[in-house]
Image (spheres, rainbow, N blue to C red):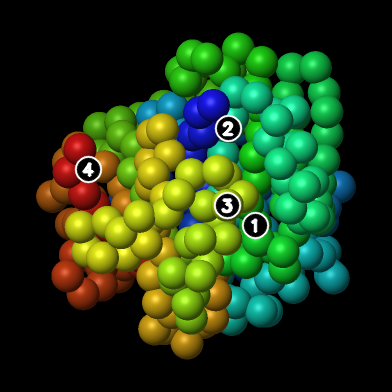
Amino acid sequence: MWLRLRQIALVAHKLAPIADDLHEVFGLEIGYRDPGVKTFGLENALFPVGNQFIEVVSPIQENTAGGRYLDRRKGDGGYMVITQCDDHAARRTHVEELKIRKVLESDGHEYKIMQLHPRDTGGSFLEIDYQYGGEDINGPWEPAGKDFHKAIRTNVIRAIAAAEIQTPDPKDLAERWGNIVQIPAKPDKGGNPSIKLENATIRFVRDTDGRGEGLGGLDLVAVDRSRALKAAEKRGKLGANGTINICGMRLNLVDA
């Protein structure tokens, strides 16, 4: 069985400024706005990054799950790690054996969703989905609508190479996630416990910024590093050691 990192969701108090940052710094374009997220009191914008996606959601009413998450994480930040699998029934059976609760579940013919409860997984929301026709990673992805390919821009960045989860105990959380996704966690070159998916890595690091456990960073494969850094500096988004800070996230430019 394979498992891919297909989408990252961020949550922000205001959507428009974050969308502008992603466009100006990384050259990304909005490929889809999902009207269905209004059911959850949210608005969104979804940006293709090659054949992966960065989604930004923002509350449009009081007392939403997204709004409560903003309060808990003390501001804008990472929200969900969304993966794509090839055998949803087997993944669902395994999750049920582990007695992990689900926040959202749908068993449609073409697209299946299994969003796990963050109190049971730890770290952040973890979602394991199935897309009919998903053998082709450049193929359809229902959360992105039908025309997202027109918005793909890869002149500045071209992929999400890693998602970084911060936590007081990286080893323990990595083992828990590894058990859920059935991929053993192993140390990366920096000694951080990590889970290697088919197309990306989930890395677990110690929480040092005082914001608590959550999705804190991404590694983005750079095509034009200089352009991104200059644009980030101009917008006041460039941090130490070349890290770009947008939506409360540490965005690291890496080589392929």
> Which residue is identified by label 3?
179
Residue at disc 2, secondary structure: strand
Give the side of residue 126 with respect to residue 219, left or right: right
Q: Secondary structure at mark 3?
A: helix
Do residues under tags 1 and 3 come within 8 Å of each other at their CB atoms?
no
Mark on residue 125? 1
Percent x, y of residue 120: 72, 64
Which quarter shows the N terminus? Answer: top right
Marks 2 and 3: CB-CB under 8 Å? no
- The mark nearer the N terminus, 4 or 3, is 3
How crowded pointer 1 is (Cα within 10 Å; few <14, some 14-19, many 20+) is rated as many
Callout 3: few (<14), some (14-19), or many (20+) C-alpha neighbours within 10 Å?
some
Query: For residue 222, which numbered disc appears in the image?
Result: 4
**Mark 1 to mark 3: distance in Å?**
15 Å
- Earlier along the polypeptide chain: callout 1 or callout 2? 2
Give the CA distance from mark 4 to mark 3.
31 Å
Q: Residues within 10 Å of mark 2 (few under 14, many from 20)?
A: many
Front-most of 16 and 98?
98
